[in-house]
Amino acid sequence: MKYILFTVIFMSVLFAHAQNKYSGKIINSENLPIIGATIQSKKNLNNAVISDLNGQFSIENNSEVIIKHIGYKTIVMSLNSGYTTIILEENDELLNEVVISASRELQRRKEVPASITVITKKDLKAAKAFGIDQLVNSVPGVLMSTSRAASNEQHFMSVRSPISTKSLFLYIEDGLPIRPTAVFNHNALLEMNDVAFNRVEVIKGLASSIYGSEAIGGSFNFITKNPTKYFTGSLDFQTNDLGLKRYAFEASQYANKNIGFYIGTQYVNRKNGPVSHSDYEKFAITFKNVNHLSSTMNWSNTFHIIDYRSDMTGSLSEEDYNNGNYESDQTFTERDAFAFRFKSTLDKTWNASNKTVFNFSFRKNEMSQNPSYRIRQFRQQGQLTGFGSGELNNDTFYSYVGLIQHKKEFNFANSSLIIGATTDFSPQKYIAETLDVTVNPSTGQNTDFTLNSGDFILNYKANILNYATYFQYEINPIEKLKITAALRYDKFDYDYNNQADGIAGPKDSKNSYDNISPKLGANYNLNKNLGVYANYSNGFTPPQTSTLYRNSFVGVGESVFDLKPSTYDNLEVGTYTKVKNITLDVALYLLNGKNTLVTLRDENDAFFNANAGETRSYGLEYGVSYKPISTLEFSHNGSFAKHEYISFFDDGVDYSNTDRETSPKLLGTTKVSYNAFKNFNVTLSHELVGAYNTSFENQVSNDDGSKSTAIYDGHNIFNALVSYKYKSFDVWLHALNLFDDLYSARASYNRFRGENSYTIGNPRAFHVGVKYNF
């Protein structure tokens, strides 16, 4: 009898346990499993599980649950006693747009107290861009300045700052910078493979509390494509009458349910373009492997190889620019770049409230130049002598980067804590030697050069170490209010070793810099389509090694010139809203800088760097789109900004309270897009760059003894794009500079020639592309 009683009790307990266990599967509208969705008991928030690789889950004790996943609408429902299949609906509301760049974790737009723009996969596909500038210049307040006729992806940048080469912008790939701090290059985006972009996120303003130095004006996060479930790929070919041809290939598939692969590659070359000495070649390949080790652990590995070479055309004189003479003075200047980047990421979800991400990255980068901007032509009594000078330089670095980040979610006030630490060790070697240049006095062209081997301008090795720790805490004290507080500490150690003692460069030295970067922000979301935000943030950028150790103020064997880190304070308020078929995004900012780094010319027409006392930038950025009908969309993205020297002296002249050079007040991109019929689209666009000073205010000495300011009048350029999709083929045509206007991608003032120099924009041109998708 006791055995029968025991059996009854045992079966009752087992049955009761089985009755309290609920199972199911989470899928999306395409019947694909959603991995990592949270299934949480409504009565006991500590009772939570996540869906596995197949979207499946099992939870005990409570049938009423909250089901949520970033990018999908959260639902509350009661589970059946059997097996429940749950379809989550994608959340396309403005404030629920998913971003990752603000914290390296998935967040909704309404939780980020900053100006952030997402160029989605859909946007990338529609743009049919053949340059990164065609993507990012659609972001309010962003100007990537490059010539589609001659720059060959070499560029300047402006985001809440003048058009410049300064280290005020951070270029990120899948959450990690593509270069180490202290080895910034304003042309770094030529080291990217845009074929592999899945989306681009642009944060404007300071992001130093997460990413550290250089995240001042803006941070660009280029997110790589993931493998597709089924075999997909594409072949495309593009060409234009600017001498450019581009070939690209992609393929992607999961080999099984746990292992996936992606490869994307391109080859680009320009030959015999409209500007002389503007040929270039580029090969790029990206390979990505994703491994789902378990339902709670993922491991991904990505490598990029970029091999690039380009002629360096140089700028045009004012006479050549105005007369349409595109003959470059250069015949041998060039830039060679090779970049290899490897990144391995392991992310572990411990439970519904804890997640840790481990990153390791290795970089190898080499850039060799015979740069046009270092060529000097010698003159006597204003006439060319037939001789000149230049340099050959090589900059090589290796990087070893580790980053660990943990996120903890708490069961009160929807709060969470992110903590992280990172170390970047980058040994660098830099060599620059002089050239003797032969100049044709009748044409002004630099026709040949001789390397003065061993005549060093600079020859050094430097070990660059950056280590940092940071945290970010978020909390909703009330439902509609999200408060974010963040803090990061950075330390930089430069160990400089002169390899040409007594010949060139300052003596050996060790230089250290550190900074604490706080951020405090708040989002208040009035409803699902209207929110406002405000933030204060601080950031800094230490001197670059090339800036610190190469300076005309430093004599051979002397102490390193004491350049100070630039520090910045940013105040910002903004709003984002969607009312029916109108979307609006507005930001108002004030950016104050101390010891801002500026580039000047010495009495020998050589560039050197110095700290300006104080600078100020403030402005309004806005983006608006309107869809009166489903097939027609109007959009305008623009900014009005002012950039000033608050305290600055140069060569004994006080330029305080004057406008900074190369600082357009107005920027804008306007588009009208019309889907005339299925799969056929026509887009007309207008690019606006307002007038700006090219010199300091009243720097120009006139013949009558008066002073004036050199300016560039700005430009208005109109473009068109026609695209059509037929079955597996995409075909498109860009018409660039429809009215064939003369314009400059960037203009600057040369005080020794007493005139502007111009980077020529493209004349009217047509670019054709065809793509086969499989």
Image: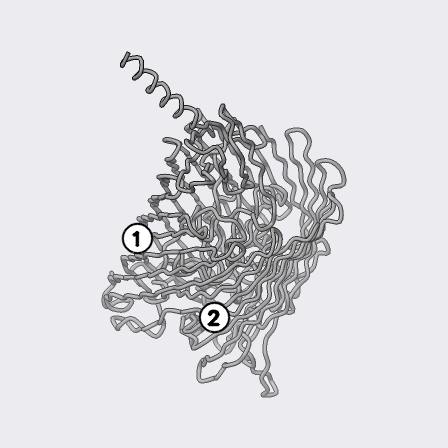
- 576 or 49: which is nearer to us? 49
Q: Which amino acid type corresponds to the residue marked 2 in the rendered image?
A: Thr
Quadrant hosting residue 728: top right
Give the position of the N terminus as an image quadrant. top left
Q: Which residue is mark 2?
A: 385
Is residue 314 toward the left or the right of residue 408 in the image? right
Seen in the picture, residue 537 relative to 659 is either above or below; the reply is: above
Whether residue 684 can be seen here? no
Q: Position of residue 395 (x, y in %)?
A: 35, 55
Query: Which is closer to the viewer, label 2 or label 1?
Result: 1
Is residue 729 toward the left or the right of residue 447 in the image? right
Q: Position of residue 75 (x, y in %)?
A: 55, 39
Q: Position of residue 627 (x, y in %)?
A: 72, 49
The residue sitting at the bottom extreme is: 705
Seen in the picture, residue 365 relative to 770 is either above or below; the reply is: below
Q: Residues within 10 Å of mark 2 (few under 14, many from 20)?
A: some
Q: Position of residue 624 (x, y in %)?
A: 66, 56
Q: Residues within 10 Å of mark 1 (few under 14, many from 20)?
A: some
Q: Which amino acid type corresponds to the residue marked 1 in the rendered image?
A: Thr
Q: Which residue is mark 1?
A: 423
Q: Compare marks 2 and 1 and give the one earlier in the sequence.
A: 2
* Residue in view at x 58 percent, y 28 percent: 774
